[in-house]
Amino acid sequence: MKKHLHDSLPPYLKVENEELWLTEDDRENLKISYRIKEVIFSQQSAFQHVMILDSYDFGRMLVLDGVVQTTSIDGHIYNEMISHIPLQLHPAAKKVLIIGGGDCGAAKEAAKYQQLEQIDMVEIDEVVVQSCKEHLPAVSGNLSDPRVRFIYTDGVAFVKERTKEYDVIIVDSSDPVGPAEALFSRDFYASIRQALKDDGLMVCQSQSPIFHLDILKQTHTNIRQLFPHAAVYTATVPTYPGGLWSFTIGSNIPLSLPESAAVPTDTKYVNEAVLKQCFQLPEFMRKAL
Ligand code: SAM
């Protein structure tokens, strides 16, 4: 155990019966706890408290302000789904923008597409990127692809100044609190549309259909009103409350998957069958949207 990192524990990390537990208690009626082996990294950045923890069941995890963002056990599900689906829908993409995504998992997946010439990653918090590169290689892959440009600034301000620049924009944000709140606003999606080329498309994570159907509905409504084409797809990510997770696409061109998809061979979750079925929504979601 790295004792010095345990000396002053934040309120969401507690020692109980000599065991270390992380408890996510950002919700009014639900607490989720993970038994932790070790605190690998802990630092208060200018934006949030950043931790890399080693847990018993989920391996290493990135935790921001006490909330689990991604883990070495299931991070690939989310990161593959937020990257490969839009890149399959736009097989001619050359220039991609990722907003957020500090764990580098989405950039790692996008870099599997050889036809991409530039992957801009705009993350507000450099501490997240550096700590994940160093301590969470299962997710970040120690990304050093020269096509990936790291830009440390607010994604909202960044897209406002771009016009018709990107083929695909991936909004890989944390929950809509703190610096990520603006990444769920209608004005932000309008700036994203302006930053996309005429045949471009965007995707964002749109939260849990089980616990935050309201956020999903609002996101879908905003995107449907701003873009000529919109669609929602899902994946199951065990560490996110509710398990079932949603992603919303806004596109300037009709959405259709290529006849035979060329999914990179080194994926762990996405394959051609997943690509085809992920847009099939359960009845409660279909009715709500
Ligand atoms: N996959 C994760 C999930 O759904 O919980 C989250 C991925 S990633 C860790 C989210 C990143 O968005 C964080 O690193 C955070 O610093 C970044 N972020 C939050 N607000 C931002 C903003 N306004 N501009 C750019 N990045 C932002």
Image (cartoon, rainbow, N blue to C red):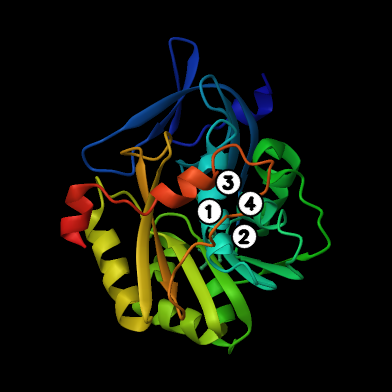
Callout 2–callout 4 Cβ contact below 8 Å: yes
In the image, which disc is placed on residue 252? none
Identified at 57% across, 60% down, the residue is 88
Image quarter in which the N terminus is found: top right
* Residue holding disc 1: 48
Disc 1 versus disc 2: nearer the observer: 2
**Which amino acid is tagged 4?**
Val
Instruction: Look at the numbered discs 1 and 2 and tell me whether their residues touch, using CB distance below 8 Å.
Output: yes
Q: Is mark 4 within 8 Å of ligand 1?
A: yes
Which residue is at a point 51% across and 55% down the rendered structure image?
A: 82
- Mark 3–mark 1 CB contact (< 8 Å): yes
Quadrant for residue 185, please give it.
bottom left
Residue located 81% across and 53% down the image: 144
At label 3, the amino acid type is Val
Q: Amino acid at mark 2?
A: Asp
For mark 2, give the secondary structure.
loop
